[in-house]
Image: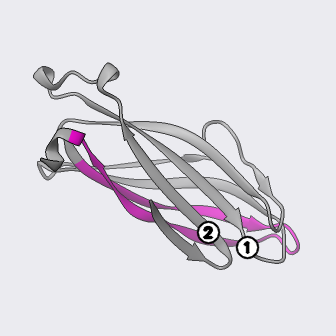
């Protein structure tokens, strides 16, 4: 599990290869990833947006930006967490993702970015 902490917000990510949704013969590899966002600070925060950098092992790079995560802009109170699962398709059986969330501190409406750690998307058979 990859983890980072930025301004009291801890982000942890784990990945799962999805063979039932993948088609290696057509260069389609599907991965799910589970993200846990923990507010270790003293003030409530709202996740406003996300910005992902997605890399295939063939050198291809994509960027994805959008509001919230899986249709939500969760408020995370101090000591609480928000968890979600999403997915990413690659054209290769190995790649990586990293990025950042834009957060709002509700106390004073200040904005700050929280780093999403780089994590790897690897089909299990590549480990052999």
Q: Is residue 119 magenta?
A: yes
For label 2, the crowd category at 10 Å Cα-Cα, with few meaning under 14, some 14 to 19 and many 20 or more, is: many
- At a point 55% along the width and 46% down the height, the residue shown is 66
- Asked if 128 appears above or below 44 in the picture, the reply is above
Nearer to me, 122 or 66? 122
- Asked if 26 appears above or below 3 in the picture, the reply is above
Q: Is residue 55 visible?
A: no
Residues rendered magenta in the picture: 95-124
Label 2 or label 1, whichever comes before in sequence order: 2
> Magenta-highlighted stretch: main secondary structure?
strand
The residue carrying mark 2 is 10
Farthest residue, direction right = 107
Q: Which mark is residue 40?
A: 1
Position of 70 with respect to 19 (left or right) is right
Image spot of residue 42 (x, y percent): 83, 77
Element at label 1: loop
Image spot of residue 3 (x, y percent): 49, 67
């Amino acid at each position: 599990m990859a983890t980072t902490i930025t301004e009291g917000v801890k982000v942890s990510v784990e990945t799962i290869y999805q063979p039932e949704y993948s088609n290696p013969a057509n260069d389609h590899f599907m991965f799910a990833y589970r993200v846990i966002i923990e507010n270790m600070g003293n003030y409530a925060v709202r996740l406003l947006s996300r910005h992902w950098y997605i890399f295939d092992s063939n050198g291809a790079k994509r960027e994805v930006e959008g509001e919230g995560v899986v249709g939500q802009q969760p408020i995370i109170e101090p000591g609480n967490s928000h968890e979600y699962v999403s997915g990413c398709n690659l054209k290769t059986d190995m790649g990586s993702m990293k990025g950042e969330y834009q957060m709002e501190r509700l106390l004073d409406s200040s904005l700050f970015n929280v780093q999403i750690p780089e994590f790897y998307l690897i089909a299990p058979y590549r480990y052999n």
